[in-house]
Amino acid sequence: MKMRIVGTLLTIVMIGCLAAAQDTMKKPSPPKPAGGPSQALLDGWNDVGRKLIAMAEDFPEDKYDFKPVPAERTFAEQLLHAANANYFFTNPVMGVKLPGEEDPKRDRYKTKAAVVEFVKKAFADGAAAIKQKGDKGMNDLIVDVFANQQTRVSDMGWGLLEHSGEHYGQLVVYYRVAGMVPPESRPKK
């Protein structure tokens, strides 16, 4: 009789534990719906911008003129080039005159703070252009001055985003050659 009571109690306790465990398990939720085309571009744009800005803010100012080999751009020149290239997307989208040069001169951005500010502004301006166009404007046509042909806003935006990603990859190498770990490769807290 005692064994039956103990067995019954154990069964009740186990059932209670299983029920409590099921209540604490996260209930599956349906996946979030996909964002629109402009949101997808904006998310990618902001992500690579965040990475380049983090590098611009993190890299020591006394190493801003570092380059792995003489034929390469300096760290600062890489940032200035990547950021300025954004304006070959942003300016046509916003109906503004193109930048006068593909690569801004380093002597115009003498300090780390000036370079960081320029990189932040270039990505913020691009984000504003993408938001202004929205989903409906992604198929609008603009002229790609490098190819001298019409292209969709979205295609040009993705192209410049990829360009920025290429320079991000180059700057990762600059970090490693300089004996440093890039911000994105550091352990997360």
Image (spheres, rainbow, N blue to C red):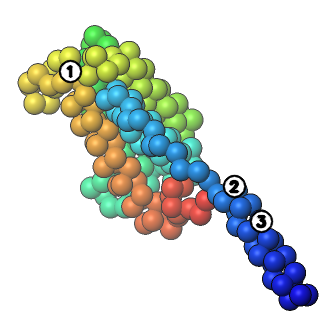
Read off the residue under disc 2.
Answer: 23
Residue at the right extreme of this rendering = 2
Is 154 on the left or on the right of 176, as rendered? Answer: left
Q: Quadrant of residue 143?
A: top left
Q: Earlier in the sequence, mark 3 or mark 1?
A: 3
Amino acid type, label 3: Gly
Mark 1 vs mark 2: give the one in front. Answer: 2
Label 2 crowd (10 A; few <14 / some 14-19 / many >=20): few
Foreground of the two, 45 or 1: 1
The reply to whether dot 3 and dot 2 touch (C-beta < 8 Å) is no
Q: Position of residue 179 (x, y in %)?
A: 50, 68
Q: Is residue 156 above or below residue 61?
A: above
Distance between the alpha carbons at the discs numbered 1 and 2: 48 Å
Read off the residue under disc 3.
Answer: 16
Q: Position of residue 125 (x, y in %)?
A: 42, 22
Q: Is residue 72 visible?
A: yes
Amino acid type, label 2: Asp
**Image disc number at residue 14:** none
Residue at the front extreme of this rendering = 1
Q: Quadrant of residue 93?
A: top left
Q: Quadrant of residue 89?
A: top left
